[in-house]
Amino acid sequence: MKRLTVVGGAFGSGKTEFAIAYARSLAAEAVHPVGLVDLDIVNPYFRSRDVAKDLAEAGLEVISTAPGLEYADLPALSPQIYTMLQDRRVTTVFDVGGDPVGARALGRFYPYFSQEDYDFWVVINPYRPDTRDVDEAERLIAGLEAASRLRVTGLVGNINLGRETTMAIWRNGLPLIEELASRRNLPLRFHMVEEGFYAANREGLAEYPVFPVRLRMLPPWLQD
């Protein structure tokens, strides 16, 4: 585990869900503080700062925009982000904008990342428009690296079609992620799966590095 972990991906990839779940898992076991930095300043629909109160109860501090601009879509980032980067006692997860434009916000902090060993994981859903084939996914990774000036170090699979997902659908999406990992010479860190799907398919998923996730950023039309 690195002190600094960046989670990026295309719009709708599930990157924010994973960033939240991963940060919560770190906070549950941590002795020192754990923070979640929301750099998704482009996408107005699925932002981790929207659930900041719930995350605070889990022992996480969510930081993004400057005070008073929490729900604005302006790149006015909080100076507290620099404090997290400088304080080596703090483990921090960064939720990065869903495209290379959003990733430029991360590039502001390149001088700090360049002096420290970090992880930069890209979440891939092979059923989303921007990552339906390996070439598209490679272009996404290249764009994120160019915009942020940071190197991607691993992949997180998020194979799903929402509530329609079956094990057959899941397995059909697997080759794309495995080929992408091979082409880019990147480790496949996790397969994030919705916790209900995991419970129903535990045996079929046993051979994979699965990270069960409770979905917390569902849009209103998918909430029961």
Image (spheres, rainbow, N blue to C red):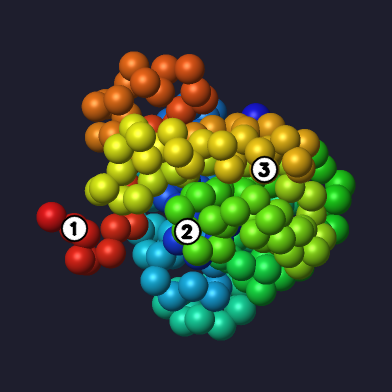
Q: In the visual, does 143 lie left or right of 60?
A: right
Place residue 140 in its image quadrant. bottom right
* Whether residue 75 can be seen here: yes
Residue positioned 64% across, 55% down in the render: 137
Q: Amino acid at mark 1?
A: Gln
Residue positioned 59% across, 53% down in the render: 133
Quarter of the image for the C terminus: give it: bottom left
Q: State which mark lies toward you, 2 or 1.
A: 2
Q: In the visual, does 139 lie left or right of 9?
A: right
* Whether residue 60 can be seen here: no
Label drawn at residue 128: 2
Element class at badge 3 = helix
Residues 149 and 126: in front is 126
Residue beneath disc 3: 180
Q: Amino acid at mark 2?
A: Arg
Residue positioned 44% across, 33% down in the render: 171
Looking at the picture, how far across and down is residue 80, in whole percent? Answer: 62, 62
Quarter of the image for the N terminus: give it: top right
Residues 98 and 67: in front is 98
Place residue 106 in its image quadrant. bottom right
Residue positioned 54% across, 56% down in the render: 132
Residue beneath disc 1: 223
Looking at the picture, how far across and down is residue 75, in whole percent? Answer: 61, 79
Looking at the picture, how far across and down is residue 185, in whole percent? Answer: 77, 36
Q: In the visual, does 52 lie left or right of 133?
A: left
Task: For label 2, count other residues whose C-alpha is less than 10 Å away and answer few (under 14), some (14-19) or many (20+).
Answer: some
Q: Is the residue 199 above or below the residue 129 in the image?
A: above
Element class at badge 1 = loop
Q: State which mark lies toward you, 3 or 1.
A: 3
Q: CA distance from mark 2 to mark 1?
A: 21 Å
